[in-house]
Amino acid sequence: MDLGKGMRATALFAFAMLWGVKQLVAKERWIQEKTAMWPWLLATVMTILSVPVSWTTVKAHAPKADSEAAKLLAGARNSRSLWKRFCGFSADIEVNLDGKVSRGKVQIDYNGKARYQDLNKEAEAWARPVLASIVDHCLDTLSHDTTCAFAEDDKHHPLGRAILALNDELHSRYRIRDNQIRQVERQTKDRRFTISVLEYRKNAEGKYLPVSYVADYWDLKTGNLVKGEDSHQTWTRIWCLLIGAQRRSSSVHLAI
């Protein structure tokens, strides 16, 4: 329904209804004494009656859940290389920040929680979110029953079909091509960020591992790009696990 036509129809209906009521009770003394309330009464009823029209319009434009979109996202998630029956591991860790090297040890338990030893504070502060992201993606704690909708009708976008995860607190939006998640867009309280995967490689089991990707961050209030980051990830197999052996990253912070 067109919002403008709906509002006009609502206003005419409200006026006609109130005019009829006024005629029916015109002989009553109280309506004559409170004539000054008539404009307020009309405005109140028109506002109440306009709500269903507006809500109908909003619902008509809301994305609808689509089982094919959910199937496409679930298939791409299942194609990734994941840690099965994970029991944890410990490893040496080396962090090089602009030529400053710090060495230590890290232990990851079966829940994916990390404990660090001997790294300096700056190196540990950098390593924690990086390694946490790798572990979270490899453990795959996300639900595979996500309710989804197609975000747009374009089926030939270079990065793949756009899929919107409904009822998602981070407003996650994916682009999927060739059974691979090529891009993820999410939103926090003050930022919107996009991760675009430039390269995947297959492991011995035929599952995909991300190798090269770019992350961009925008300020929600200004809409300005505030940070850009590119990463290259290598993997090594230890027993049945493929573990990130080396990650090279560079970032640019923009003051706009």
Image: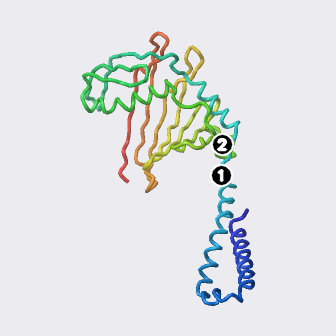
- Residue 134 position in % (x across, y down): 44, 27
Find residue 188 and report its horizontal and vertical position in percent: 46, 46
Q: Quadrant of residue 15?
A: bottom right
Question: Does the residue at mark 2 contact the one at mark 1 (Cβ under 8 Å)?
Answer: no
Kind of residue at badge 1:
Ala
Q: Nearer the viewer, residue 60 or 17?
A: 17
Question: Looking at this view, is 187 or 101 the one in front?
Answer: 187
Q: Is residue 204 above or below residue 226?
A: above
Vertical comparison of 219 with 186: above or below: below
Relative vertical location of residue 43 with respect to residue 113 in this rendering, above or below: below
Image quadrant containing the N terminus: bottom right
Amino acid type at image mark 2: Ala
Q: Report the label total.
A: 2
The residues bearing labels 2 and 1 have C-alpha atoms spaced at a distance of 10 Å
On-image quarter of the C terminus: bottom left
Question: Residue 238, percent across and down?
Answer: 44, 12
Q: Residue at x 35, y 16 (%)?
A: 91
* Nearer-the-camera pick, 206 or 27: 27
Counting residues from the start of the chain, the first of labels 2 and 1 encountered is 1
Query: Residue at the location (40% across, 26% down)?
Result: 247
Of the numbered discs in the image, which one, if any, rests on residue 45?
none
Q: Does 83 sit left or right of 61 as displayed? A: left
The part of the image, by quadrant, that contains residue 175 is top right
Name the residue that disc number 2 marks.
149
* Residue that carries the numbered disc 1 in the rendered image: 62
Helix, strand or loop at disc 1?
loop
User: Crowdedness of circle 1 by 10 Å Cα count: few (<14), some, many (20+)?
Assistant: few
